[in-house]
């Protein structure tokens, strides 16, 4: 289990959100698609 915790810590450290101003410049529909992709990408281990 310790290896799994380390793996999660590494994933969380490398998963850096872009600054808010970048997201605000995009259309809302595109932003929603990006958020869904991030959720799917992060839940698959």
Image (spheres, rainbow, N blue to C red):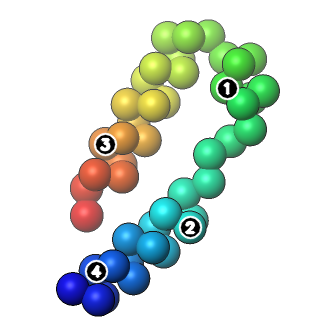
Rounded to the nearest whole Å, what is the CA distance between mark 3 and mark 4? 19 Å
Is the Cβ of the residue at disc 1 closer than 8 Å to that at disc 4? Answer: no
Residue at 68% across, 42% down: 18
Residue at the outermost left position: 1
Q: Position of residue 24 (x, y in %)?
A: 71, 19
Q: Is residue 18 left or right of residue 21?
A: left
Q: Nearer the viewer, mark 2 or mark 3?
A: 2
Query: Residue 40: image x %, image y %?
Result: 31, 42
Residue that carries the numbered disc 4 in the rendered image: 4
| Picture layout, residue 40 above or below residue 29 | below
Quarter holding the N terminus? bottom left
> Which residue appears at 38% of the width and 71% of the height?
8
Q: Quadrant of residue 4?
A: bottom left
Provide the residue designation for mark 1.
23
Under circle 2, the secondary element is helix
Q: Which residue is mark 3?
A: 40
Image coordinates of residue 44 in percent, x first then y, are 25, 56
Q: Residues within 10 Å of mark 1 (few under 14, many from 20)?
A: some
Residue at left 62%, top 54%?
16
Up-down relation of residue 4 to residue 40 (above or below): below
Vertical placement of residue 12 versus 21, above or below: below
Q: Quadrant of the C terminus?
A: bottom left
């Amino acid at each position: 289990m310790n290896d799994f915790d380390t793996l999660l810590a590494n994933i969380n450290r490398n998963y850096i959100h872009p600054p808010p101003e970048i997201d605000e410049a995009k259309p809302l529909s595109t932003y929603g698609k990006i958020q869904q992709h991030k959720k799917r990408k992060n839940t698959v281990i």
